[in-house]
């Protein structure tokens, strides 16, 4: 199959799974097809997936990843010993583990093509990730509390693992409890990485954005906590916005 044929195959298979969409035509344009495929993956509930569908999905996503380009931690220059600052798409990083700023449901973002990191990670890791996260939540019997971390395979991402952590949501002002929970997210991820022999971790800007933790304070807590607890683990502070890049640049080195 060509990449275009894989994309159409996946769209048709996902449309067929849901009776209300079975008669929906596949758009002719590539950009429209890409958006529809991502939307269908985003709304798909965590349920078993056929091996034929998985095989095509894996080939499609890995080909897409190669086309987008992969950045290896070995090619980065540290800002200070063991700490890196990198601006870009965290789903294109090759390292031990990347950190997902998850919601308490842990199974990803269900809003089609939403711009959050949770949506991107679940999209480009593939549909097995949501199923795995649902298994973890089902096993513990409750939603994921803030400040902890869970480990899953990375599936079709170039990294080896994903660390999922739920940060605090700011409703009014930042409390001492909010600060402690955010620091706990970083500690929990590092502890879980250490227990599993993971030697490098890429952190996103946990709790900023839609969770409304102030970016400058979040960066200070992130850098301080990682410096205290990283041990021998190499850490990448991954940022996407120019504002966050400047904040971390001023804190590092």
Image: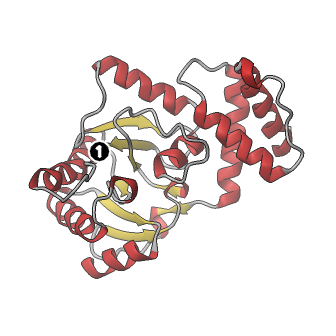
- Left of 217 or right of it: where is 64? right
Rendering coords of residue 86 (x, y %): 44, 70
Q: Quadrant of residue 203?
A: bottom left
- Considering only vertical position in the picture, is 158 above or below 125? below
Point 46% across, 27% down: residue: 132
Position of residue 125 measured from the top left corner of the image (x, y, whole percent): 55, 41
Question: In this rendering, does residue 253 appear at all?
Answer: no
Say whether residue 193 is left or right of residue 31: left
Q: Which quadrant: the N terminus?
A: top right
Q: Is residue 69 above or below residue 155?
A: below
Residue furthest to the left:
176
**Dot 1: what SS?**
helix
- Report the residue at 75% width, 32% height from top: 10
Residue position marked by numbered label 1 in the rendering: 193
Q: Is residue 18 above or below residue 61?
A: above
User: Which residue is painted at 13% across and 56% down in the image?
Assistant: 175
Expressed as whole percent of the image width and height from the top left, the position of residue 195 reads 24, 39
Q: Quadrant of residue 78?
A: bottom left
Left or right of 194 in this view: 99: right
Q: Residues within 10 Å of mark 1 (few under 14, many from 20)?
A: many
């Amino acid at each position: 199959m060509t990449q275009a044929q894989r994309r159409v195959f996946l769209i048709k298979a996902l449309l067929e799974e849901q009776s209300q969409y079975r008669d929906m035509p596949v758009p002719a344009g590539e950009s429209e097809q890409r958006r529809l495929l991502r939307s269908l993956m985003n709304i798909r509930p965590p349920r078993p997936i056929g091996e034929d569908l998985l095989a095509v999905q894996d080939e499609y996503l890995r080909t897409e990843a190669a086309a987008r380009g992969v950045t290896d931690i070995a090619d980065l220059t540290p800002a200070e010993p063991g700490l890196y600052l990198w601006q870009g798409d965290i789903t294109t990083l090759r390292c031990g583990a990347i950190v997902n700023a998850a919601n308490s449901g842990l199974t990803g973002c269900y809003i089609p093509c939403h711009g959050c990191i949770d949506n991107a990670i679940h999209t480009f890791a593939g549909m097995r990730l949501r199923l795995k996260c649902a298994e973890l939540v089902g096993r513990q019997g409750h939603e994921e509390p803030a400040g902890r971390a869970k480990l899953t395979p990375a599936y079709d991402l170039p990294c080896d693992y994903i660390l999922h952590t739920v940060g605090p949501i700011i409703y009014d002002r930042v409390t001492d409890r909010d600060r402690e929970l955010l620091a706990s997210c970083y500690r929990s991820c590092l502890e879980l990485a250490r227990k599993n022999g993971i030697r490098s971790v890429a952190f996103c800007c946990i709790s900023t954005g839609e969770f409304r933790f102030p970016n400058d304070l979040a960066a200070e807590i992130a850098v301080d906590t990682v410096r205290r607890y990283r041990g021998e683990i190499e850490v990448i502070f991954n940022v996407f916005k120019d504002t966050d890049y400047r904040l971390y640049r001023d804190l590092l080195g």
